[in-house]
Amino acid sequence: MEQVIKQSEVVENDFVKKWKEGGGKVLGYACVTTPPEIIDAAGILPYRLRALGNPNTEIADAHLARFNCSFCRSCLQLGLDGTYAFLDGSIETNGCDHLRGMFENWEYVQPSEFFHYVKVPHQVNEDAMVYYIEELRLFKSAIEEHFGVKITDEAMKGAIERQETIRDKLREVYEMRMGRKPAFTGTEALSIFLLASAVPYDDFIRLAESAIEERRGTGVSGYRARLMLCGAATDELELINAIEDVGGLVVTDGLCYGARAFWSPVDTTRDPIEALADVYLKDLLCPRMYEDYPRRRDFVLDAVKKYDVDGVMVMHNKFCDVHGVDNVQLRLDLEKRSIPVLQLEKEYGSTADIGRIRTRVQAFLERIGDQS
Amino acid sequence: MNAVTATATQSYTSGGKGPQDLKLGLFDRVSGLFEIIGKLPDVMSDEEVDGLMAVLAEDTRKSLSAMLIPRAREGSMAFMKMLARWLEDARNAPLEGKKSILIPFCFPPEIIHCFENSFPLTSEVLSSLGVIALEGQGERYYDMALGLGLPDHICSANAVEVGSMLGSDDFQPQAIVSAAVGSCDINSKTHELVSNYFGIPLFILEKPVDGSERGRAQYQKNFDRLVRELEEYLGEELTDDMLRRTCEKVNKANRLMAELWDLHKAVPDPVPNLFSLYSYAARFAMWGTDLAIESMRTLVDVSKRRLKEGAYPADSEVARCFLTYTSYYFDLAGLFNWMEERGYTYLGDGLGLLFPGVIDTSSRESMLWGMAEEAWNMPMTRQVGGESMSMCWLEDALYAAKDLGADCAIYSGHHSCKQTWSVASILRTELMKRAGVPMLALQGDSWLKRTTPITVIQQEIDEFIKNVVLPKSGAKRKLRRRGVGAAGTASTAETTSA
């Protein structure tokens, strides 16, 4: 577990360095609507962009504005200051207005060697599915053309199986958090999750298996309440740590840097691209999607039951519109069912905000009462 | 006058401070006010205007006196009377068995006007009317939205109206069309929330962020699906005759819109600054109706007359400014009139970047294609709903700046426009690089006066024009001044620069 935590705390981890030293290529993507399987099938390492709570945005602020979410500003900062220099290209999706702006500015200032835009519909219907499937085929062709590789169906199936195995490990980690004595804290679970989309397959499986074995039969106790985190992009280990530090054990989440990214399995028996389209669009749980709120709400309600959650924290980064509004609906629905809920707006990665968040969480825990 | 209207009327004349009117919604108050405006004579003397101002509450008086300034009065009356009818029809719609459908400004209302059984209410136009016409400028409704837990970075253009719906005894739409999906997250999410909150249907028109033929074809599929869904919901088939009748009216109004655009090219600009706002407000609420045509014709006629007279509010036109996106609507006198009285022409803004076309009315397919094309080209949808937010916006802003002979661009920096904010720096850099047009980026809320006072905005515009625009374009300005003055013969910017 120590190795997992250490490697998850840096953007360019030792495994990426080794991969690059061996001549491997790395492609960055930001949003859960991007299937890493297509990148993996080309023999390229898919790397999910992250900012890991980086609070410095002085270079990015010359391009994005203070009215843009600080997660995107933080990622742009790392793109422009050279932290992401190891990337051989990046994939844009229209995840949200801020994300689009982040990619446009990144490309405007420092054009990538390879850049592709996967356009993702905001609705699920027959026309949208056909369009998205074609988008994924165009994405595959763009990689083939630029990197001079042929992605066969066999390669696709292999990649799907590998990514599915990764997701299985994540599901196992989450299952081990269900009991009254969870095997992992929320901070540890996030560390494992972050590595799953940042290191080569073999390395991740080895690390995950080792962490799981280390924790099997053990459990966390002494917490005040079992919490579920929902909301915007949250890859800040320090934030989860601050919540757990005051007694709120995070036992599950509805985050895109979390359960929402791996909950749905890929059908390995179907046409690979069509199977991926089902998972990355039809099954997508994200407030960027419309006519789909009841499914998002039910996902949270199911998790509350399954993980025996005492309270739900719905968070959004300042200026995040999709979560900022969706969280209101979710809060109202949770309140209707008498499930304690804390709606929290926060500044991404700001250590100055941690004190305020701790106070809010402490007050929330008081409201819930001691559940240990 | 019904009971609600009577209370609303009392509310705006008294300032709306009575406890009973706290539950009174924005729509009821605005429609009560416009019921009276609709009864005013088309032509009013200064004395009559003064008499009217004497009975109005302060905020209402401030806006109406700005609109009824002599040079803009005729156009303003035509515009307000069109709105009075729009609000009256909306109020009567449920009584006539019609369904009120809430739409965003980026959705062509003519599609709803086409149907016999429905009536469109444009969210942003209602919010703007609340801000312009009501005592308190609609801020209480914005606060109601925030009271529900909505974040303070939601768009006030929606929040003022939506807050009224959610927090007061205001009208509720029977359905919502959301057409900002793909071009504005906050607009789309706010409408989704209202739909879920009231349990009313939400119809979506998504714009793919794809400028290719494939993207346009996908949009047509989305548009055709929306029409089918509306037909089913309203229990009414959109016949060719209904489509043609509306499309012909759209074409007429589009021609007038294009004519108004061309009139802006003259130096000095004969179009009163406020007319930019009026023309796109008509487009967002009443396109496809005779009333919109009448209102637009008045705006064009007044401007033509002023062109002939060489009329301009200041001694000379000092700077021609194009606002790249939204404007500020909470102080019409403080922005539009203030600018032109200092010689700062307001050539238009991003909400007028809608490039009206001509719909081919020869067949059902051509009309549906043409209507979808109108929808595709609506402001915001066309620019930041494009494949590249920065480049699609830049192309249009560049075109406007060049075509209208702009000396400078101003970005109002409405704080909720995250998508434009996220690429505003690219726009600023490229406008300068490609056209030598400097851009001032302001920060403020277009609908709420509490964020940045108008005096600060005025000061920044003043400093920008004096210290950046004029020194930079000194030579060009001298040429223009030689050729034209306030009382001189107007010529077009192109002729002058040539």
Image: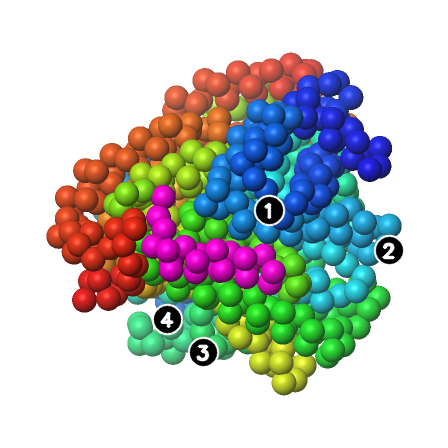
Residue B43: mark in rendering: 1
Q: Quadrant of residue B375?
A: bottom right
Q: Residue flagged by tag 3: what amino acid is it?
A: Thr
Q: Residue at x 66, y 63 (%)?
A: B290
| Residue B307 lies in the magenta-colored region | yes
Q: Residue flagged by tag 4: what amino acid is it?
A: Ile
Left or right: residue B165 compared with residue A258: right
From the image, state whether disc 4 or disc 3 is nearer to you: 4
Identify the subunit bearing mark 3: A
Asked if marks 1 and 2 fall on the same chain, the answer is yes
Residue B97: mark in rendering: 2
Pick the quarter of the image with the C terminus of chain B.
bottom left
Marks 1/2 in contact by CB < 8 Å: the verdict is: no
Identify the subunit bearing mark 4: A
Residue A143: mark in rendering: 4
Mark 3 — residue? A152
